[in-house]
Image (cartoon, rainbow, N blue to C red):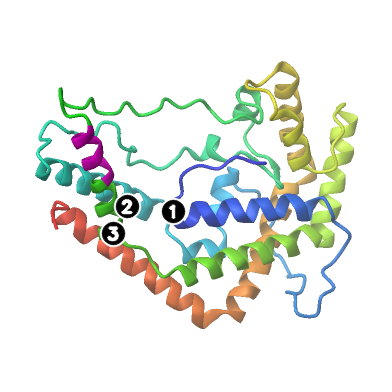
Amino acid sequence: MPRSAHFGRFAAATLAAALSVSATACSNNSGKVSDESAPKPPEITSTAAPESGRGGMTGLPLSAYQADDRTSVKEIQARNMLVVSCMHRAGFSAFTGDGLQAAQPPDNATALPAGPWGYLGAEAAATLGFHPPKRTAPRPDAAPVGAGEAYDNARVDCDRQAAEQLGSPPAAGAELVGRLFDESMKAAAKDARVVAATRAWTVCMTAAGFEAATPDELARKYQTTPEATPAELAAARADADCTATSNLAGLWFAVLAGYQRQLIDRNAQALTAQQEAVRAQDARLTRLIGSGATS
């Protein structure tokens, strides 16, 4: 499966589910969507490929209805402030939060370079293959001497309190966005234009010496080893080249966006409510950060 990175709680779950569905759908491409209730093949005017896979995903129409990078960073900042403040109140004034998640968005170039759209980013293909970059785990704060169980219990309780204070938009809205992502990706995988581009990609990869029916299938072949191998790097470089020559990524994202716009029109009222909830959560995070997260 293609790899993902932190998008915030809502966006990360949505994206993971959507890519899981797309991997299955892309392996069963057979032509245009035939279900009368399904979105119709959309007209597309531009097929310019995004600079990165993650950039393409976060730029999709449905992504406007979930937390963006700015809100996700705010959420991390607010949670960290709440946990540090709580630990200080619990008597652990030396706690600095060094082991908490860093409040920064992922690097687009390495967070999601490979997917059903092919491989975007020649540099990442040449150095990472289909493996994610290694990341150094946060170093947890050392517990005060003699703290033991009291310190551990305080950390657990402060995490719980932070989660309660942060809250989240209603689950129904996030579930709707996830379902619509799934529907749009199933439709795009069956769209005749994506099918043709994927076939062109396959022909190109075969000529380069790599057999795979879809980009997802290719990536899975090489993700069973702990490290990227020379053969994997060669396959990733060929994938990047074939993605460009077939314009698979440009067509994939353009077609997917067209299906998503149709689904948004069909679910406008519920999605407007979800967007308002996401904006309200962003405002709540801003207030918590501004107050020093001591509430």
Helix, strand or loop under label 2: helix
Q: Nearer the viewer, residue 143 or 93?
A: 143
Residue 80: x and y, percent? 25, 44
The structure residue drawn at horizontal position 46% and vertical position 77%, both measured from the top left corner, is 272
Vertical comparison of 269 with 176: above or below: below
Marks 1 and 3, how far apart in space?
14 Å
Residue 106: x and y, percent? 45, 40
In the drawing, does residue 133 fall left or right of residue 293? right
The structure residue drawn at horizontal position 23% and vertical position 25%, both measured from the top left corner, is 142
Residue 88 falls in which quadrant of the image? top left
Q: Residues within 10 Å of mark 3 (few under 14, many from 20)?
A: few
Residue under label 2, please give it.
Answer: 75
Marks 1 and 2, how far apart in space?
9 Å
In the rendered structure, find residue 164 and report the number of the disc placed on it. Answer: 3
Prevalent SS, magenta region: helix
In the rendered structure, find residue 9 and report the number of the disc placed on it. Answer: 1
Residue 258: x and y, percent? 67, 67
